[in-house]
Image (spheres, rainbow, N blue to C red):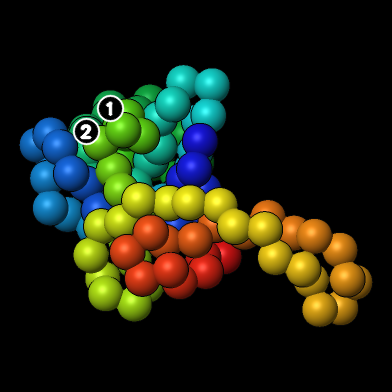
Amino acid sequence: MKIKKNDNVIVIAGNYKGQTGKVLKVFPKKNRVIVEGVNIRKRHTKPNQQYPNGAIVEKEMPIDASNVMLVDPKTNKPTRIGKKIIIDDKTGKKKSVRVAKVSNEMLS
């Protein structure tokens, strides 16, 4: 899975198409991600310390990872992701980094 936590992504399919947000959590085995402010559902909670009378809480639910694309940091448009091997300056070892295909910009 090429999408990681804290990546900035845009939804390319589904009810939330066009919305952008930060990835909060990744589920690689299920190929799903939770994006901030996307796919919000209401959940009824039992009374607890935070909600003594119970409540209806809105929370983000997972969406399929194939429905999101990484946002290019340079152009702010959706981009595919590639891998590039570079040599680390400090250690001198080879290191694999993610690269945006559109602008060839390195990603964290």
Q: Residue at x 86, y 78 (%)?
A: 90
Depicted 102 relative to depicted 41: above or below: below
| Residue 101 placement: quadrant | bottom left
Q: Amino acid at mark 1?
A: His
Q: Residue at x 31, y 33 (%)?
A: 66
Alpha carbons under labels 2 and 1: distance apart: 7 Å
Q: Position of residue 24 (x, y in %)?
A: 45, 49
Does residue 95 appear left or right of residue 58 in this picture? Answer: right
Name the residue carrying label 2. 42
Depicted 3 relative to depicted 70: above or below: above
Residue nearer the viewer, 64 or 50? 64
Q: Amino acid at mark 2?
A: Lys
Secondary-structure class at tag 1: strand
Secondary-structure class at tag 2: strand
Name the residue carrying label 1. 44
| Residue 108 placement: quadrant | bottom right
Q: Residue at x 38, y 26 (%)?
A: 46
Q: Label 1 near label 2: C-beta < 8 Å?
A: yes
Using a 10 Å C-alpha cutoff, classify the residue at mark 1 as few (fewer than 14 neighbours), some (14 to 19) or many (20 or more).
Answer: few
Residue nearer the viewer, 5 or 105? 105
